[in-house]
């Protein structure tokens, strides 16, 4: 599935050394679904290729980091192999992705910064929630913390800068935060410099579960708005091991 | 019965680390692993362990360990740490010791270095989490409940220990464990184009030092600040390699190490080569650091040489008390230690 923005021409990769044990395959310098698609297609292709000496790959918003053992493969050989792989698939290739329906509560203590954010954006709280909950979010990558979902696709009306300094206190597990045109979901309690606008009862990351994450980069997430009462009910179900998220596409 | 180690005293930074948690950076999980992989690997190989077996990483604050239940061989290597046997005998800075139940080894920081590693046969038997026994302090999993070691913790070996009949104490006389006075070698990039060329000159000309802000995530550098080019200092997040030098808006650089985030949003001017990253990790706050530019082939050759040396570790194990070794004399060995551990 491709997103409406995916009309730009495919970017040619740049190969950048990150020491002698890692190589960056960079497809762009911006947050763009097309660029991210290229990263994800390349990530899958590199892992399928089983290149000797490649230890692991880290796909990000706009680049793929390839960690490798230089005693098994030289940087030049690796670049040659990667270029072969990169040239081997159609530039319009898109990752196969799923669309998920995720419950999020935008009320009360689940949305500690919502009133502040609405005030900053000079719009009613209900408008913020309505805009955010009707967006189609795209999971670009995991990063910042284990299982932290880094998502784009926020409505442009909701654009706001990061806070000048991190807010006091920690974001609760499942906390939904927003800033710089992106949405994040916290896998565990951590500080943030973004705005906490909601909370999901789903456990999107669990160490004792296989797979440890439910969504993969490239997937889309649409939101089922739930009230505070339902949040409590679903939290109990999640704690009992029931998956709350539903595949809808 | 297997011997085991009980932690009698621990400071604030002793953890269990294996060769690192690989394959999960894509989920935002840091690689963890030892700060000085060369010392970690040395201690493990001396015992015949795989180079990535789980060992104790001891920080400057030190640790006291007691052998219990049955005899146990331990090997240790790292910076200059003072290892004391049963409160009286100084052991070599790097060595292989057979402990009997009741024996206590105290580890305290010596004249240089930040980390030392204590290995036991087969590695430490804690349950792997995401295929690794490394402690992830930030996310609180791996090792022992994802935390620093504390008094009362018991560490058991994975392998059956075979009590040795030969001398109970040997020294590891490995030259690569000595304090490095050489410049730390760097490969430029991946975002060196985000900096003024004057910053590149400064990096290789001026002295830097490790700031008091240092931990397993990274070491901040004191010294001349770096100037970002007109491209600014915000990049869309990309991957961070072990040893990459990241420069946020303040211009103060931070070398990102074992517990770094796998991705980040500031430009990285250069990356410390793998052969030198352990030396950097062993540099204490305030101690001077100088950098030197290097290329892929030089970095690979340096790594290959280390790898080959580590493969010949047996040649560097000497009976403690050998009087013909300047190295051992340098270790300040005291007469009679050869009897340590002989039951």
Image (spheres, coloured by chain):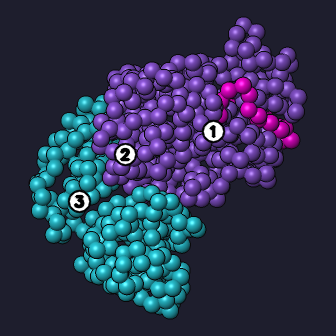
B124, above or below A202, in the image: above
**Where residue B48 sits: x, y (%)?**
59, 33
- Cα distance between the residues tagged 1 and 2: 24 Å
Is the residue under label 2 in contact with that under label 3 (CB below 8 Å)? Answer: no
Q: In this view, does A64 lie to the left or right of A207?
A: left
Any part of residue A182 in sight: no
Q: In the image, what residue occupies the spot 49% across and 89% down?
A: A228
A191, above or below A124, in the image: above
- Category of crowding for the residue at label 1, using alpha-carbon neighbours closer than 10 angstroms: few (below 14), some (14–19), many (at least 20): few
Q: In this view, does B33 lie to the left or right of B75?
A: left
- Cα distance between the residues tagged 3 and 2: 19 Å
Is the residue under label 2 in contact with that under label 1 (CB below 8 Å)? Answer: no
Picture quadrant of residue B137 = bottom right
Between A209 and B26, which is closer to the camera in this rendering?
Answer: B26
- Badge 3 marks a residue whose secondary structure is loop
Is the residue under label 1 in contact with that under label 3 (CB below 8 Å)? Answer: no
Q: Which of marks 1 and 2 is in front?
A: 2
Any part of residue B87 in sight: yes
Residue assigned mark 3: A32
Residue assigned mark 2: B233
Residue assigned mark 1: B212
**Where residue A94 sits: x, y (%)?**
17, 62
Tell me if residue B95 is in the magenta stretch: yes
Q: Sequence-wise, which precedes: disc 1 or disc 2?
A: 1
- Badge 1 marks a residue whose secondary structure is strand
- Category of crowding for the residue at label 3, using alpha-carbon neighbours closer than 10 angstroms: few (below 14), some (14–19), many (at least 20): some
| Magenta range | B93-114
Q: Which of marks 3 and 2 is in front?
A: 2
């Amino acid at each position: 599935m491709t997103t409406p923005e995916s009309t730009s021409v495919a970017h040619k990769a740049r190969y950048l050394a990150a020491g002698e044990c890692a190589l960056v395959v960079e497809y762009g310098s911006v947050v763009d679904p097309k660029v991210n698609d290229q990263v994800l297609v390349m990530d899958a292709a590199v892992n399928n290729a089983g290149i000797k000496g490649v230890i692991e790959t880290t796909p990000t918003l706009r680049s793929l980091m390839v960690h490798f053992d230089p005693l098994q493969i030289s940087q030049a050989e690796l670049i040659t192999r990667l270029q072969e792989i990169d040239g081997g698939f159609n530039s319009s290739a898109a990752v196969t992705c799923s669309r998920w329906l995720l419950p999020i509560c935008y009320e009360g203590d689940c949305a500690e910064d919502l009133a502040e954010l609405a005030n900053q954006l000079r719009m009613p709280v209900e408008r913020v929630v309505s805009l955010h909950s009707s967006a189609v979010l795209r999971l670009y990558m995991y990063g910042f913390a284990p299982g932290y979902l880094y998502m784009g696709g926020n409505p442009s009306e909701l654009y706001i800068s990061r806070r000048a300094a991190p807010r006091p206190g920690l974001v609760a597990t499942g906390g939904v935060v927003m800033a710089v045109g992106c949405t994040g979901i916290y896998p565990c309690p951590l500080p943030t410099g973004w705005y906490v606008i909601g909370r999901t009862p789903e456990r999107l990351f669990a160490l004792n579960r296989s797979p440890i994450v439910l969504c993969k980069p490239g997937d889309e997430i649409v939101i089922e708005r739930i009230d505070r009462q339902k949040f409590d009910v679903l939290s109990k179900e999640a704690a009992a091991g029931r998956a709350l998220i539903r595949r809808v596409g | 019965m297997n011997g085991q180690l009980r932690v009698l005293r621990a400071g604030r930074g002793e953890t269990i680390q294996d060769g690192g948690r690989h394959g999960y950076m894509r989920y935002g999980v840091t690689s963890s692993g030892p700060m000085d992989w060369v010392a970690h690997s040395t201690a493990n190989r001396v015992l015949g362990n795989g180079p990535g077996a789980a060992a104790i990483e001891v920080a400057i604050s030190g640790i006291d360990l007691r052998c219990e239940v049955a005899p146990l061989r331990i090997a240790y290597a790292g910076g200059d740490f003072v290892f004391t046997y049963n409160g009286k005998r100084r052991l070599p800075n790097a060595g292989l010791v057979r402990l009997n139940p009741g024996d206590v080894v105290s580890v305290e920081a010596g004249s240089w270095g930040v980390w030392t590693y204590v290995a036991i046969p087969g590695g430490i038997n804690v349950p792997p989490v995401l295929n690794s026994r490394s402690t992830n302090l930030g996310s609180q999993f791996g090792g022992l409940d994802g935390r620093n070691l504390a008094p009362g913790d018991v560490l058991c070996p994975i392998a059956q220990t075979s009590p040795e009949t030969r001398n109970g104490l040997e020294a590891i006389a490995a030259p690569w464990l000595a304090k490095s006075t050489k410049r730390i070698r760097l490969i430029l990039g991946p975002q060196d184009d985000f900096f003024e060329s004057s910053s590149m000159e400064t990096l290789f000309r001026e002295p830097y030092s490790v700031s008091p802000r240092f931990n397993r995530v990274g070491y901040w550098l004191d010294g001349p600040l770096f100037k970002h080019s007109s491209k600014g200092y915000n990049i869309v997040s990309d991957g961070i390699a072990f040893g990459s030098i990241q420069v946020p808006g303040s211009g103060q650089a931070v070398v990102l190490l074992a517990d770094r985030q796998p991705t980040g949003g500031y430009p990285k001017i250069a990356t410390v080569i793998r052969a030198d990253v352990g030396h950097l990790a062993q540099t204490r706050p305030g101690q001077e650091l100088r950098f030197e530019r290097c290329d892929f082939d030089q970095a690979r050759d340096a790594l290959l040489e280390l790898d080959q040396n580590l493969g010949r570790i047996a040649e560097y194990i000497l009976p403690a008390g050998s009087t013909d070794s300047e190295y051992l004399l340098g270790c300040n060995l005291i007469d009679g230690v050869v009897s340590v551990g002989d039951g």
